[in-house]
Image (spheres, rainbow, N blue to C red):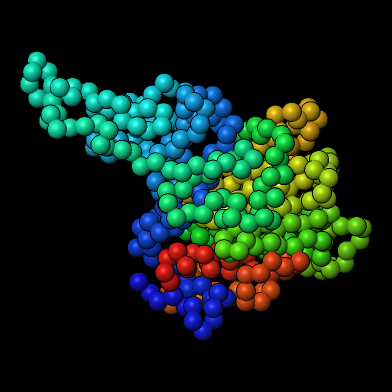
Amino acid sequence: MHPSSTTRNGLTRVPFHVYQDPALLDHEQRDVFEGPVWNYLCLEADIPNPGDWRTTFVGRMPVVVARTESGTIAAFENRCLHRGSLICFDNAGHARDFTCVYHAWRYGLDGTLKSVAFRKGVNGKGGMPDSFRPEEHVTRKLRIATVSGLVFGTACDRTPDIETYLGPEVLAALRINASRPLTVIGRFTEVLPNNWKLYAENVRDTYHASLLHVFFATFRINRLSQGGGVSVSANGGCHVSTTLAPEQETDTAYDGMRSVDDGLRLADPSLLDAVDEHGDRVRQQIVSVFPSFAMQRTYNVLAIRQFVPRGVDRTDLNWIYLGYADDPPDLRRRRLKQLNLAGPAGFVSMEDGCIGNFVERGAAVAANASSLMEMGGAGTESQDTRATETAIRGFWKLWRSMMGM
């Protein structure tokens, strides 16, 4: 393993080998995803009734999340204790219990082993030894925490409570919807041709948005000259960045820049006909939870992004578009129309689907070189500007502490 460049430049340098080394995947799985972190699992709305379940991932670990008979939420590794097969294959469903298709070992909704087929053998022959005790064989279970309809899980006993882990600013941003039940209005998976950490950087990169995304700056959805800022949690790993509606629309800061195309016009201007439904003037907001969760608000779009590592240079990006169960019809129509802003073909975030691969290709033989991240200083403090890389440095601060690098 290459040494990490941490001493001379602190958090402002990230060696490119950390995106390229296949050996790091196993290290990250053990010490990051299964370490003292809170991983996003699903929505409470995904499993509203006892017996409802959904499959998800903690890093590369397959996981089942289920609503038990008592109404609590349980999560366990999606792996049969017998020969290691997946227990659940589908994305979601409803069941009284789970049975492995391979040899019919049966599990309760909380992952407890209930029975073993032919445990006593057949006609007095074969079967498990008399010493076999089902209760001695336990699936790996996760501790659960919920925040405003979002379900998080941790596989580590050392993980602090989720309120401490998130910090007050991030917690408040996630609780924007606390009084209204969420509902899913769309979901899909986008395959990214890059390491998962490049996307983790991207959602924390608060100053690329109005430069890379021409639509943002042209139609004044997100400009660095507008109000807002970045809050970073004490551990560095979680953040919330906010762009506020300007007091006045006149803005010359981007005149003549490539990121603005004054010739662009919308055939349907109602795409940007938004309402300030939360009364906070937010035009764009990104909230991240280390290691692999982001929530987006853009006008009336509300979306979750869960990124799942599939290899050293492949990431599955799960998009979940949300509304509120009590949305009036006109607001639901706004949300559905504005979904065209985000996603792999979105007017805004289309570019994010390829920019990570541009880094992969550009740094293909630069394993011993490093990226440079000095915008906004060298620390991980919260700032009242988005012309900064403080949240990215915060990600690497927590990643390095967990990886021992």
What residue lies at 40% left-to-right and 59% top-to-bottom? Answer: 31
Against 159, residue 62 (above or below) is above
State the residue lying farthest toward the top.
123
Please tell me how many numbered marks the rendered image carries: 0
Viewer-nearest residue: 362 or 241: 241
Viewer-nearest residue: 280 or 101: 280
What quarter of the picture does the C terminus occupy? Answer: bottom left
What residue lies at 41% left-to-right and 21% top-to-bottom? Answer: 96
Q: Is residue 232 left or right of residue 101?
A: right
Whole-percent x, y for residue 257 in the image: 78, 68
Tell me, yes or no, if residue 355 can be seen here. Answer: no
Tell me, yes or no, if residue 109 can be seen here. Answer: yes
Q: Is residue 142 left or right of residue 318?
A: left
Q: Quadrant of residue 118?
A: top left
What quarter of the picture does the N terminus occupy? Answer: bottom left
What residue lies at 75% left-to-right and 62% top-to-bottom? Answer: 229
Against 286, residue 15 (above or below) is below
Q: Is residue 89 left or right of residue 200?
A: left
Whole-percent x, y for residue 380 in the image: 62, 70
Whole-percent x, y for residue 26 in the image: 35, 58
Q: Quadrant of residue 356?
A: bottom right
What residue lies at 83% left-to-right and 58% top-to-bottom? Answer: 262
Against 231, residue 275 (above or below) is above
Viewer-nearest residue: 312 or 268: 312
Whole-percent x, y for residue 100 in the image: 31, 28
Q: Quadrant of residue 17?
A: bottom left
State the residue lying farthest toward the left.
125
Against 170, residue 404 (above or below) is below
